[in-house]
Amino acid sequence: MPAAELPRDLAEARIRAVQHLSRVAPVLDDLAARLGSTGHALAVVGGSVRDALLGRLGVDLDFATDARPEEVLAAVAGWGTTWTTGIEFGTVGIQRGDLRLEVTTYRAEAYDAQTRKPQVRYGDSLEEDLLRRDFAVNAMAVPLPFSAAAPLVDPFGGLEDLGRRLLRTPGRPEDSFSDDPLRMLRAARFSAQLGFDVDPDAVRVMAEKAERIDIVSAERIRDELAKLLLAPHPRRGLTLLVDTGLAGRVLPELPRLKETVDEHHRHKDVYEHTLTVLDQAIAQESRLPGGGPDLVLRIAALLHDIGKPDTRDFGPDGGVSFHHHELVGARMARKRLAALRFPKQVVEDVALLVALHLRFHGYGEGEWTDSAVRRYVRDAGEQLNRLHVLTRSDCTTRNQRKAARLAAAYDALEARIARLSEEEELAAVRPDLDGNDIMQILGLPPGPDVGRAYRHMLEIRLDKGPLEPDAARAELMTWARAAGLAPPPAE
């Protein structure tokens, strides 16, 4: 259930959490019994408790115990499939049916101020373990086996924060964010995921300690940004990152968009436009074959105009232009995403979308030729559906007549693409003559000249559509004579 619907009676809310956990009670009871038989305690903790209270419990469950990792492994031997990739931090993973369980020994770590790597020390109590959590809403526990007399351990007021839709650190935010600067990005991510506000003191410290994020690895920053963008409310998290100065350190291209607002406000606020395009792209993800959330589309929407600050130019009449900002932006997007260690395919897909996002407007408002439509499809390739959504989302004008005209024009374009695709199989467009045909007709061996001829025939295919064999051969011979590659006349 949404946080706003949490019951006013905190005792009732505590019981509600147990009820939501009850659907996996047999597994929880079994695990608790196995550890209890050796004298150890077990509790569901962190995000699992938060999500149970919110009515959105998933299949990944987190636990805390006073048992050491080797004792946990011994207790669950033969009970489920285990993994130990986090054992150096006291965590043992267990797969039991469709549930992924992570059991972590109580911890009370200190942090290296230069690397954010924790110096792991096992703790002595559940309360001490909860103190090290990032936010109070993630610092609650349900002891196992369930007890109606004490269904919830909540030493830092996390339940009340859930009702207030608030993210607040269990201790002083100065200590929490200095110890682990990644928590500042997690604040923005949870705000985007849950729709919660961040406590004003925490926001203040995020701004004061923004430079601490520099010690966090690019991969960890990437993961948080991706989760933020895939959340239901990414604008909330992005705005928080920009307002606190964190975006200036992890995604500086975003706050730089504010530079495009001149003192007379004579042209569009590109920063606000960008956030609106992102919102509109998310709203249209149902147009994609796989639906959403779609990371590539959302990143492309966020970065589509980042080339504008570097290409802004004022004309003599005070007008502003951003010539070739889509090409500059594509290069910038590729560089930033590579620096954040995004997968190569994500980098290239986003860069392509940024480079092509103006193509529709570049052809003007008149009727497109079939050749232009074929090239649009060819250049977009597998990103065509995303390009459709991005281009539609890029219309943020308040002029309803203009917006309707652009939407109608794009409707017509998609209809043309559908018609030509049915007639010509546009998605797999190929020249009428392949490499073997070219070599046979021109008497050429394999080599660069064959590639040049193939590319020419592809352009002919895009310009004129499918040709009959004799017409395709005539086009090839015309090109070959001009290129000095025509075969000698037959004797």
Image (cartoon, rainbow, N blue to C red):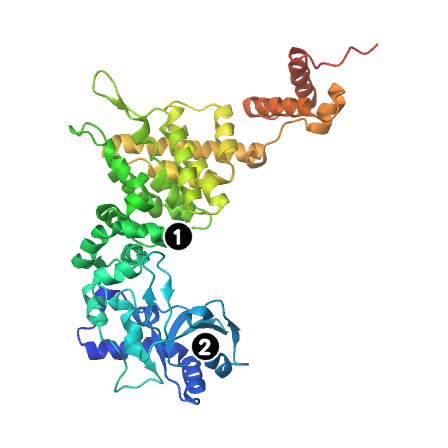
- Give the structural element (helix, strand or loop) at label 1: loop
Q: Residue drawn at (37%, 36%), measured in percent from left and top?
A: 391
Is residue 358 visible in this depiction of the protein? no
Q: Position of residue 455 (x, y in %)?
A: 61, 25
The disc placed on residue 69 is: 2
Q: Residues within 10 Å of mark 2 (few under 14, many from 20)?
A: many
Rendered-image quadrant of the C terminus: top right
- 89 is higher (above) or lower (below) than 202: below
Quarter-of-image position of residue 51 = bottom left
What's the residue type where badge 2 is placed?
Answer: Pro
- Residue 262, above or below 486: below
Front position in the image: 309 or 303: 309
- The one of 411 and 327 positioned closer to us in this rendering: 327
Question: Which label belongs to residue 303?
Answer: none
Query: Label 1: which residue?
Result: 217
Residue drawn where x is 34% and y is 61% of the image: 112
Q: Disc 2 to disc 1, how far (Cα)?
A: 27 Å
How far from the left and from the top, in percent, is residue 474?
68, 16
Identify which residue is drawn at 22% across, 60% down: 174
Left/right placement of residue 425 relative to residue 258 reads: right
Residue 233 location, x and y as percent? 29, 53
Above or below — where is 353 with respect to 200? above
